[in-house]
Amino acid sequence: MKQKIVVTLSMLAVLLIVEIFLTSSHPEKMWLHFPGSEAWLGALGGILLMKIAKILGQYWLSRKDDYYHG
Amino acid sequence: MANTGCPERMIIIMDKLLLHPSIPFFAGAFLAIWLPNHLRKVVQLAIPFISWFCLQTFLNTTSSFHLQLFGYEFILIRTDALSLLFAYAFLVYTFFANLYSFHENEKYIHASANIYIGSSLGAVLAGDLVTLFVFWEIMALASTVLIWNKERSKSLGALFRYLLVHLAGGLLFFAGILIKILHHQTLNLGPFTLDSAGWLIFLGFAVNAAIVPIHAWLADAYPEATPAATVYLSAFTTKVAVYAFARCFAGSECLIWLGAVSAVYGVIFALMENDIRRLLSYHIVCQIGYMLCGIGLGTELGINAGTAHAVGNILFKGLLMMAAGSILWITGKSKLSDLGGLAKSQKLLLVFYMVGAFAIAGFPFLNGYVSKALLIKAVLKSHQEWLEFVLLWVAVGTFLSIALKLAYFAFWGERSEIKILRPVPVTMYAGMTGISLICLGMGLFPDLIYRFLPYPIHAQVYDPVHILHSLQLLAGTFLGFLFLVKGLHTKDVISLDLDWFYRKGAVFFVNQICSPIRGIQESVQKNLTEGIQRLAVWMRQIFPSQQISAVSHPLFMLVTMSILVGIVVLVSR
């Protein structure tokens, strides 16, 4: 797992360096002022979605598989 | 549609009617029942080509498909860029879906699929509301049959719920048409205002499009069907509704809100799901949200993006359903909690699944990337930054649930020993190969889809910055997944959705309402039973036992009942 994380982080670092050279200093989107903003959105947005789904499932919506037929 | 004032007569010119692209499908439905197995399967493969030929022949002639009936003129076919885009997408997809379901030996699946596809085609080619409604309802009935799965007893309940929801949607649609007729408004398909009739028609469309909060029928019904039937179901009903929205309600702002809510709702429920086909069904709801956002923007680029995503979705969602169906076919299991370790033995299946997963996630060089990039451009042009943020967030969830969660637990996961019951048939692979190549082709050469879009388009989606941002988004999501994957476990559970209200809540409600009535009913039943018992005792005292048995003989009772019913019918007349 650690190896996969290191590889992904390296990939992201490369993408970040490329971004610095490619993007303009006046990006059209507000959040693109931060370097690697889309990567942040991916990581944090993904974690947030997983947490929301887990909390909704665990405390409210999950039922046994035979709930409607038991 | 206009009242022509002609005497009530029906003009049907057979050579014209035979050219309607739906006719080969309807004829194929009858043939599917009568033909022997092998011949039927060959015919199935030929039908999309015959239908394509009919459509091309129609396009090359100047004839029109107008039918005069009851003083009204119905437009059976109206071909413009929007309807042709959907018609072509349906025909291409049908060929590969038929190839995928080549192994299917159940005649009723092929017969009902043909009627379903034929009516879907008729719906997207219809020029007026009545014609659209007729095909719409045939589509609902045929798809109901497709949901029936002999091997799953639960499918019958899902089938009835599906039918009831769609009949309710059809009634709303019909009520809208009636109001339009009463107000002498045009029934020709075109942009409608959201007056009383418009809202009813809108709601009728919304039921078929599975927009939140009237979406639960989809995740309830589609996973119950056979793998082959689900491949058909995933492509048509919702996309016909998207077409109808694009045709009649493009630019309605409420579509943007409903689309955004559906997209977020669908992706969260997909993340909660354990059943792979239910998970993918929630992603249909989610992706419909994308399409509606584009259509709701109402700009040329927005409508192009929404319809391009609909066409892309037919393909990559079909591919994902095919892969999920193949998993069910080879293992007999569809729950992530029962699956795992398939990557070792099913490498080819993994490749096809990942093509679909990356396409839906918007990975560069696949068709999902093109339509999502167009949509983001349309959103930015309309200055709806909040919507862009929501759509990107949903893209993160899509990649997370389909390409990471589902793939991880089905192909790798905790369980490494999974029994393979039978191999994937070659024709299933052939169907998936075809769709994968189209997804790749449309991703590499966006002009393949651009030329069929409703409005001219010159958007450049492959600019380095956009590719870079897409890769960052996906890599960031992967990183987030890696951090949380150890804590992820699958459990044999279901998630309650809004169908709870009519599956449990309504039962509870009816029980509460009926409890006083039930007391009266039980009292009447008890008194009636006692009365009949007393009558029987009295009869036995009067008549000897042999005569009683003669009177209670079934044949005697049948004849007596028939005479009594006859008398009642005669008297009532």
Image (spheres, coloured by chain):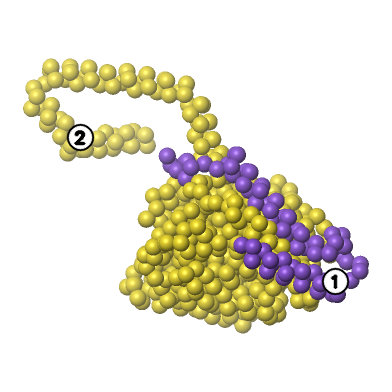
Residue that mark 2 sits on: B557
- The residue located at (40%, 77%) in the rendering is B42
Q: Position of residue B78 (x, y in %)?
A: 64, 70
Q: Find residue B452 and report its image quarter.
A: bottom right
> Which chain did the renderer colour purple?
A
Amino acid at the residue labelled 1: Ile
Q: Which chain carries label 2?
A: B
Which residue in the rendered view is the most extreme toward the bottom? B60
Name of the residue lying farthest toward the front: A2
| Image position of B221 (left or right of A17) | left
Residue in view at x 69 percent, y 48 percent: B199
Report helix, strand or loop for mark 2: helix
Answer with left or right where residue B553 lies relative to residue B250.
left
Residue B120 x, y percent position in the rendering:
55, 64
Closest to the observer, A15 or B129: A15
Task: Identify which residue, B518 or B320, lies in the foreground.
Answer: B320
Mark 2: give few (<14), some (14-19) or many (20+) Cα within 10 Å.
few
Task: Chain letter for mark 1, please.
Answer: A
Chain B shade in the render:
yellow
The foreground one among B401 and B224 is B401
Instruction: Check disc 1 and report the residue beneath it.
Output: A20
Residue kind at label 2, given as amino acid type: Met
Disc 1 is placed on an element classified as helix
Examine the rendering and report whether any part of residue A29 can be seen. Answer: no
Residue at 52 percent across and 63 percent down: it is B412
Q: In which quarter of the image is the C terminus of chain A?
A: top left
The residue drawn where x is 87% and y is 60% is A30
